[in-house]
Image (cartoon, grey):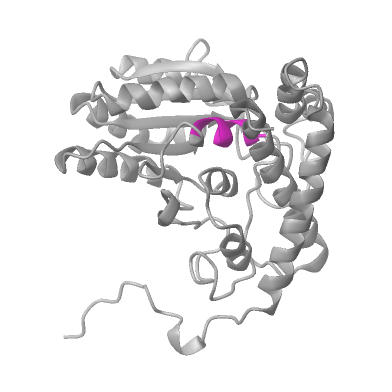
Amino acid sequence: MASTRARLIRDMVRIRTVEEVLADHYRDEQEMRTPTHFSIGQEATAVGVCSATTVEDWVYSGHRSHAPYLAKGGDLEALVAELYGKEAGCAHGRGGSMHMIDQSVGFAGSAAILGEMISVAVGSAWAFVRAGEQRIAVTFFGDGAADEGVFAESLNFAAVHRIPVVFVCENNLYSISSPLSVRHAEGTSVHGRAAAAGVRARSVDGNDVFAVHAAARDAVEHARRGTGPVLLELATYRWRAHVGPGTDHDHGYRSKEEIDSWMAGCPILRAADALRAEEPDIDAAVEAWRAEFRQEIHAAIDRAKALPFPDTARLLDGAYLPAAH
């Protein structure tokens, strides 16, 4: 299946399969000692947006970084090696799950500090303009990061200077365990705040990969023309806990019924249903892709386990050290 719509589904299946296998190994083996934030259930946001970019466009994300890293084309073996803390990891075993990077494909980096990469993406996009390059920057962040001051400051700066950046808010309704209802005034929204700052903004069903892809394509084209920044607020939902491989319906802030209702709207199943008339064999293709990607991730895990850890004598390589006086 070579159609664009089928490829979007394939990319979501790959991310889902990779993360589910990693979550199982993380829980059962206790060999990955980095905090992990899985995107299981949110695959449509990363795939829909990144598929609208080019290799030259730079993508940044926050702590929930595996999905945009893989959707942008990041090296899987380097991701897995990083989770196991190995020198061959994408951050040489020093960053862990929240510090993915593969600039060869345009995944510029991710970081754990809430909202940090929003301003970094704006700065990168401004640099592209000043260098006369037809490139854009994209920054993924959650609804919790949209409550940080850096979000408002970055919106304003990008709007004033018509910077070619696409802000992507993956609104999964919770900032760790705090729901939107206790953080945002009734009748307000993330895209509404962006519009008030003079940024072109829209709300999209983040579990509809085809709608996300179409909206992202329009946003990227708008930014690349030099007509200013765009914000996409994508309504989605994480199936697992905020951090770690487990579930958290027993933690008191959301119910199993709420999680189950969102799981029933699985972005992969929705996309397959929408494509079935065009691709009658889509269900068989999804199962074949699952088997292919299970084999791929298991092989990557086996290779990562056999790799060496960083040399303790070089643990500070890449760290900022002030000059001795």
Q: Residue at x 78, y 30 (%)?
A: 259
Q: Is residue 233 shown above or below 29?
A: above
The front one of 26 and 307 is 307
Q: Is residue 252 shown above or below 182?
A: below
The front one of 160 and 12 is 12
Q: Residue at x 56, y 43 (%)?
A: 71
Q: Which residue range is magenta in the image?
A: 42-49
Magenta run includes residue 124: no
The image position of residue 120, as x and y in percent, is 32, 46
Occupied quadrant, residue 271: top right
Which image quarter holds the C terminus? bottom left
Determine if residue 184 is in view. Answer: no
Please state if 85 lies on the left or on the right of 113 as rendered: right
Chief secondary structure of the magenta portion: helix
Q: Residue at x 64, y 69 (%)?
A: 84
The front one of 167 and 196 is 167
Q: Is residue 221 shown above or below 141?
A: above
Please state if 218 lies on the left or on the right of 152 as rendered: right
Which image quarter holds the N terminus? top right
